[in-house]
């Protein structure tokens, strides 16, 4: 088992307390195995990053972003690192989560139904 990193844990706790309205709305729909029985956790350290939401079992990461993330080279590098480590990443805009929750949940459910990336990929 990996050891907890105190710096990453403190950052994750801070991010959970400062979650956006869209992150909180999506979290309320995913928590407690509410979507097809899949367990999600929020603000989870993954390697050098802290991801918004993750289903560890299906290796699916969900990021909920505001406009400051449009065309972000940092986000592209982060997504590539996560893909290189066999994670799938779905990104949704805050306004999509708040105005089209049904569509967002359908997209997440479809991704959960797919097989997770193979570790030897």
Image: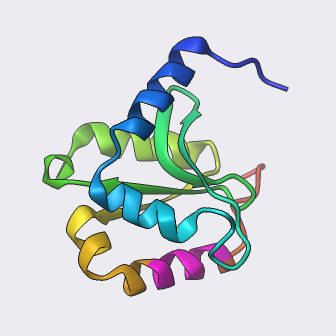
User: Residue 96 appears in which quarter of the rendering?
Assistant: bottom left
Q: Give the magenta range.
A: 105-112
* 71 vs 46: above or below: below
Residue 110 pos. (x, y %): 57, 82
For image coordinates 58% across by 53% down, the residue present is: 54
* 54 vs 46: above or below: below
Judge left or right: residue 83 versus residue 95. Answer: right
User: How many marks can you see?
Assistant: 0
Per the image, is 111 magenta? yes
For image coordinates 58% across by 80% down, the residue present is: 109
For image coordinates 69% across by 52% down, the residue present is: 56
The one of 58 and 77 positioned closer to us in this rendering: 58
For image coordinates 31% across by 61% down, the residue present is: 22
Residue 63 pos. (x, y %): 40, 54
Q: What's the magenta bit mostly, secondary-structure-wise?
A: helix
* 120 vs 117: above or below: above
The outermost residue toward the top is 6
Residue 64 pos. (x, y %): 35, 57
Colour convention of the picture: rainbow
Per the image, is 115 magenta? no
Judge left or right: residue 37 versus residue 45. Answer: right
* 7 vs 114: above or below: above
Judge left or right: residue 14 versus residue 121. Answer: left
Quarter holding the N terminus?
top right
Residue 101 pos. (x, y %): 37, 80
């Amino acid at each position: 088992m990996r050891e907890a990193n105190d710096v990453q844990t403190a950052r994750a706790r801070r991010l959970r307390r400062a979650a956006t309205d869209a992150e909180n709305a999506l979290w309320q729909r995913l928590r407690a195995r509410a979507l097809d029985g899949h367990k999600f956790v929020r603000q989870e350290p993954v390697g050098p990053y802290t991801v918004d939401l993750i289903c560890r079992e299906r290796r699916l990461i969900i990021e909920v972003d505001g406009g400051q993330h449009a065309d972000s080279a940092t986000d592209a590098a982060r997504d590539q690192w996560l893909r290189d480590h066999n994670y799938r990443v779905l990104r949704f805009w805050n306004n999509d989560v708040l105005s089209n929750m049904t569509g967002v949940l359908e997209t997440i459910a479809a991704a959960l139904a797919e097989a997770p990336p193979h570790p030897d990929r």
